[in-house]
Amino acid sequence: MLAAPAFSVATASTPVTRNLPAQSFAESAQHSAHGGAQLGASSFLGGALGVAGLAGLSRRQRTKAARKLQTARQFSVQLPSIPFMAPPGKKTVIITGASSGLGLNAAKELAASGEWYVIMACRDFQKAEKAAKEAGMFADSYEVLHCDLASNRSVRHFVDAFHAMNRPLDALVCNAAVYFPNAHKPGIFLPGLFAGEGPRWSADGHELSFAANYLGHFLLCNLLLEDLKRSTVKPARCVILGTVTATVNGAELGGMIPPLAHVGNFEGLEKGMKAPVSMLDAHEFNGAKAYKDSKVCDVMLMKELHRRYHQETGIVFTSLYPGCIAETGLFREHYPLFQNLFPAFHKTVTKAYVSQEEAGRRLAACVADERYATSGSYYSWGGEAGTGGSGGKDAVENKDKELDWFMNYGSFRTLTVDEIGGEAADDARCRKLWDLSERLVQAR
């Protein structure tokens, strides 16, 4: 296992009682697999149904749900942003999808350093708060704010809530993602395992993988760019998660498993990415490919942010693949057999297995370690040393480009902005993606 970064030494702190969220309610998506988007309001307790989501309920149920929704909205207006006595002087990082897995472990690592105050941007407030407590995070080291990346309105509410805290922003981590690998398969294929639902849609009517994994992060980066510019921490950083399956890192095995990522010339995006158009290349929907395509877009976003803003602002924009986290909640909708065999395969055969804890340390290093401060870089790890992988090598100094039997590079390979491969290498397409995305979210 790689040694924990120097900044990860836990410091003593006095727990602070947490009774209320700083900002509880925002417009959120009641995501539908059938037809279109259903826009609703989601409380931090997850107890309010959206108006459009009431159609399938009885009259009595609709009345009851509507009352809950009205109460939630009134309370959200009356409830001020409540600071939990966050210690002054700490650097501030926002991490999306921090309620579990990679995001939670990175949040824990940074909070434990004593140097960072973590804003956990999560769709499910209650889940995130519980996870933080179970992870042993001190109450004065983090804040949970509601953010549903599949709703542009929710993203804007989140930014407003963050600004109400009157804190600086020194780092932004775009980590949250959803994955529906079987959604395109016939319903009779292993019934009950999330198959046959077809595309799901966001609150704004876009295919859900594209909306939550990429478009919401695109909007968030744009809305928080000025905050990063004002940071007194040099350099401020924006880290966007990639994946080996997005084929940006040469001919590695992970990027050669079908269906291959292919965004085309964004024909689907040009059509608005709304039903019935569900894929960026306007082809037939495929759940696994939709995820891979969205991650290609994330790397393109990093490149375009670097091109547009790094030289002017000094902000460091990077992407990373933290290694194969084979036991992640991202696979919750995959077949149980896959969930059981996948970790064992990578522990014993490919040696590419990475624990969630180790992956969290790697992500935290990209936020706080000065060795990972080269803007435009794509950092890609292999397996950790504890499972026989090559993860014991020094991350930033490994220059090994030899392929092993599984076509994996060494433990770590840093790609400069000019070395990023696949469709993300096309600068013209990166600019086109930006322009089309800006049109969708009206970012400015």
Image (tube, grey):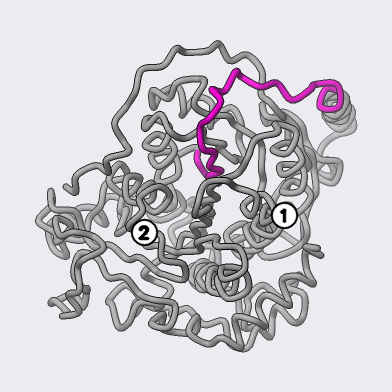
Q: Nearer the viewer, residue 339 or 351?
A: 351
In the picture of the structure, the residue carrying the numbered disc 2 is 372
* Marks 1/2: CA–CA distance: 24 Å
Residue in the picture at 47% in, 13% down:
15
Residue in the picture at 59% in, 69% down:
305
Left/right placement of residue 341 relative to residue 273 reads left
Residue in the picture at 52% in, 35% down:
118
Q: What percent of the width, then of the height, locates residue 175?
A: 50, 52
Left/right placement of residue 58 relative to residue 33 reads right
Q: For residue 90: magenta?
A: yes
Amino acid tagged 1: Leu
Residue 319 visible here: yes
Q: Which residues are magenta?
A: 75-98
Q: Is residue 166 above or below residue 403?
A: above
Q: Nearer the viewer, residue 224 or 272?
A: 224
Residue in the picture at 86% in, 33% down:
62
How packed mark 2 is, by other alpha carbons closer than 10 Å (few <14, some 14-19, many 20 or more), is some
Are circles 1 and 2 on residues that touch, CB within 8 Å? Answer: no
- Residue 378 figure quarter: bottom left
Amino acid tagged 2: Tyr
Q: Which mark is residue 15?
A: none
In the picture of the structure, the residue carrying the numbered disc 1 is 223
Q: Is residue 261 above or below residue 214?
A: below
